[in-house]
Amino acid sequence: PDGFCIPFAAYAQFTRSHGLAERLARMQQLPRFAEDAQVRRDALAALRAEMAQWPLPAGMAQAWQARWTQQLGGAGVFVRSASNSEDLAHFSGAGLYTTVPNVRAADALAAAVRTVWASVYNFEAWEARRAAGLDEETIVMGVLVQAAIDSTASGVMVTRDPFDATHRHATYISAKRGIGIRVVEGKRIAEQVMYSSRSKAVQVLNRSGDDVALQLDPAGGVREVPVQAGRAVLTDDLVHCRRDPSSRRPPGPENPKCNRPAAPARRALQPNSSHPLPIHL
């Protein structure tokens, strides 16, 4: 889908104007901050709440709104994270930061961007970066403002076996019906399958246990739609045509979309990458 980026420089300007570095230093001096996870959780929540209320530099929100109107027609957009602490060689960062779905009002766009910026300090993100030894002073957040599209099914594809790195011919797919926000966030049990490019076999690890799908709400955001839990999300044909376009089969009752090209991904990835690739059907 079409969209535009808000670069790291905008985040740096925003946080610098509000003294974030000094605020972080004070936070880390709180009693038992280093030892007590609950202290860190509470302090980070307070910081995110503050950041969500900090005024934007002059003209910044107006520039975003103009771009949204001129390029995307003011239609609903997903406001997505794009930090420099994602998709690293030894740290994926998947699911750590916040996406604000289907933003439809001009004033809500600025609020959504601040929410994504503040998600740098999600508790899970802080803990994961800390465990990985990443330098907090170097972390910045970009934002992708992207046209909202509905999905019949969506999820994440990893072109490696995440359970055994020696299986270089394996692809892992985690998917559920509807928009896949909760799959990426790890909040729902998704359908999990493994595909072998060597044997062309599809192994079902488990079916989705979710009995609702997320769909775009015309009023903004997303809404839950009931679905049948345990029913297959991905047929073998769909798995083949997502992972191996050369093996696409003619469309039929079980694979009506298999002759369509894959939707553009948020990040361009090369085959055999170990990073998660969003997929939409």
Image (cartoon, helix red, strand yellow):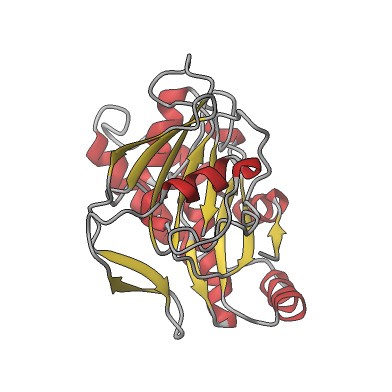
The residue closer to the viewer here, 228 or 236, is 236
Camera sees residue 23: yes
Image side of residue 66 versus residue 173, left or right:
right
Of all residues shown, which one is farthest toward the bottom? 219
The residue closer to the viewer here, 41 or 95, is 95
The location of residue 177, given as percent across then percent down, is 37, 61
The residue closer to the viewer here, 212 or 239, is 239
Which residue shows up at 58% across the image and 38% down it?
139
The residue closer to the viewer here, 240 or 116, is 240
Image side of residue 223 versus residue 161, left or right:
left
Which residue shows up at 54% across the image and 80% down it?
104
The location of residue 15, given as percent across then percent down, is 60, 52
Image side of residue 47 versus residue 225, left or right:
right
Camera sees residue 21: no
Decide: is 153 above or below 167: below
Which residue shows up at 26% across the image and 35% down it?
37
In what quadrant of the picture does the N terminus appear? bottom right
When asked about the image quadrant of residue 173, the answer is top left
Figure disc tally:
0
Which residue shows up at 43% across the image and 74% down it?
221
